[in-house]
Image (cartoon, rainbow, N blue to C red):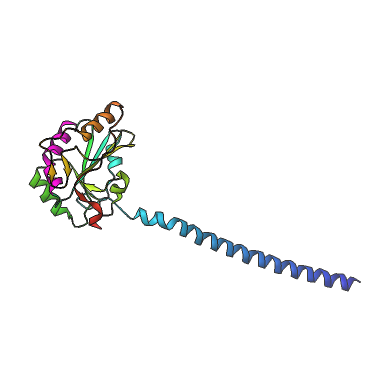
C-alpha cells in the first residue's frame, strides 16, 4: 500500500512538474505575443515620430514649443509659387507689425527646398521672419493646409483658430482683384489676441502642396 501511495505521489509530482513546465512555457509564449503585439501597435507612432520639422541648420524644430504662450502664425510658402511670392510684402509687413505679440514662421513644405535655396529666397523677397523646412508635411497636417500660400493661426493655447487664405485678393489662379476686400489673416490674428470669434476658414488660391509628393 505504501508502495502504491509512493508511486501515486511520485506520479503526482511528475504531473505537477509537467503542468508547471507547460504553464511556464505558455506564459513565455503569452509574453512574447504581448511584446510583438505592443510593437505592432506602436509602429505607426514610432514611424510618425521619425518625421521631423527642421530649422535651416538641420536641427529639429518645434514652433509650438518655441512660441510658448504666444499666439502663432504658420505661413506656408513655396519658392516657385508666384502667388506665394506676390504676398511677400504683406507677410513682411504683418509679421513686423505683430512681432511683439505673435510668433511667425515661414514654412517650406517642398522637399526640394534646401536650406541654401530657402536662404536665397528669403534674401530675394526680403523676409525677416524665421523659416522652417517641413518636407514630411508634419506641420501641414497639423495646420490642415493644402495650398501655398496658406496660413494657420493658433491661439496662445496653440488651438487652431483659422486655416486658409491670407485675404481674398485672388479669385482664382491668375485672376486677382485690384485690391483685397476681406482680410482673413489679420482678422484671425485679432481673434487670437482678443478672444473674439475668428473668421470662417476660407479656401486659399495658389499651388497645391500635394503636388510636392
Q: How many marks?
A: 0
Residue lying furthest left: 124
Residue 24, percent from left and from top: 64, 64
Q: 206 or 90: nearer the eye?
A: 206
Residue 185, given in percent of the width and then of the height, sits at 22, 35
Whether residue 90 sits left or right of residue 11 in the image: it is left
* 30 falls in the magenta region: no
The quarter of the rendered structure image containing the C terminus is bottom left
Quadrant showing the N terminus = bottom right
Determine if the magenta segment contains residue 95: yes
Residue appearing at x 40%, y 54% in the figure: 45
Question: Residue at horizontal 27%, vertical 42%?
Answer: 63
Extreme-right residue of the structure: 1
Relative to residue 157, is residue 190 drawn left or right?
A: left
Residue 95 vertical placement versus 146 (above, below): above
Query: x, y (%) of residue 165?
Result: 22, 40
Is 118 in front, or is 196?
Answer: 196
Q: Is residue 203 above or below residue 157?
A: below
Front residue of 196 and 43:
196
Q: Nearer the viewer, residue 91 or 6?
A: 91
Give the extent of the magenta segment. Answer: 82-98
Q: Where in the figure is residue 156, as x and y percent of width and height?
A: 31, 33
Secondary structure, magenta segment, majority class: helix
| Drawn side of residue 30 relative to residue 1, left or right | left
* Displayed quadrant of residue 175: top left
Amino acid at each position: 500500500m505504501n508502495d502504491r501511495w509512493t508511486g501515486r505521489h511520485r506520479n503526482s509530482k511528475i504531473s505537477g512538474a509537467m503542468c508547471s513546465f507547460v504553464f511556464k512555457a505558455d506564459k513565455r509564449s503569452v509574453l512574447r505575443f504581448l511584446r510583438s503585439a505592443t510593437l505592432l501597435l506602436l509602429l505607426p507612432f514610432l514611424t510618425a515620430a521619425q518625421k521631423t520639422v527642421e530649422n535651416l541648420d538641420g536641427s529639429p524644430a518645434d514652433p509650438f514649443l518655441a512660441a510658448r504662450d504666444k499666439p502663432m502664425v504658420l505661413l506656408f510658402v513655396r519658392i516657385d509659387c508666384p502667388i506665394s511670392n506676390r504676398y511677400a510684402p504683406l507677410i513682411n509687413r504683418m509679421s513686423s507689425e505683430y512681432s511683439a505679440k505673435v510668433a511667425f514662421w515661414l514654412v517650406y513644405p517642398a522637399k526640394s527646398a534646401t536650406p541654401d535655396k530657402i536662404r536665397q529666397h528669403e534674401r530675394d523677397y526680403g523676409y525677416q521672419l524665421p523659416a522652417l523646412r517641413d518636407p514630411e508635411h508634419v506641420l501641414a497636417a497639423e495646420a490642415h493646409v493644402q495650398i501655398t500660400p496658406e496660413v494657420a493661426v493658433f491661439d496662445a493655447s496653440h488651438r487652431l483658430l483659422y486655416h486658409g487664405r491670407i485675404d481674398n485678393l485672388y479669385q482664382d489662379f491668375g485672376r486677382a482683384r485690384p485690391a483685397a476686400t476681406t482680410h482673413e489673416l489679420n482678422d484671425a490674428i485679432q481673434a487670437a489676441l482678443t478672444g473674439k470669434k475668428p473668421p470662417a476658414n476660407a479656401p486659399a488660391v495658389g499651388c497645391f502642396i500635394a503636388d510636392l509628393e
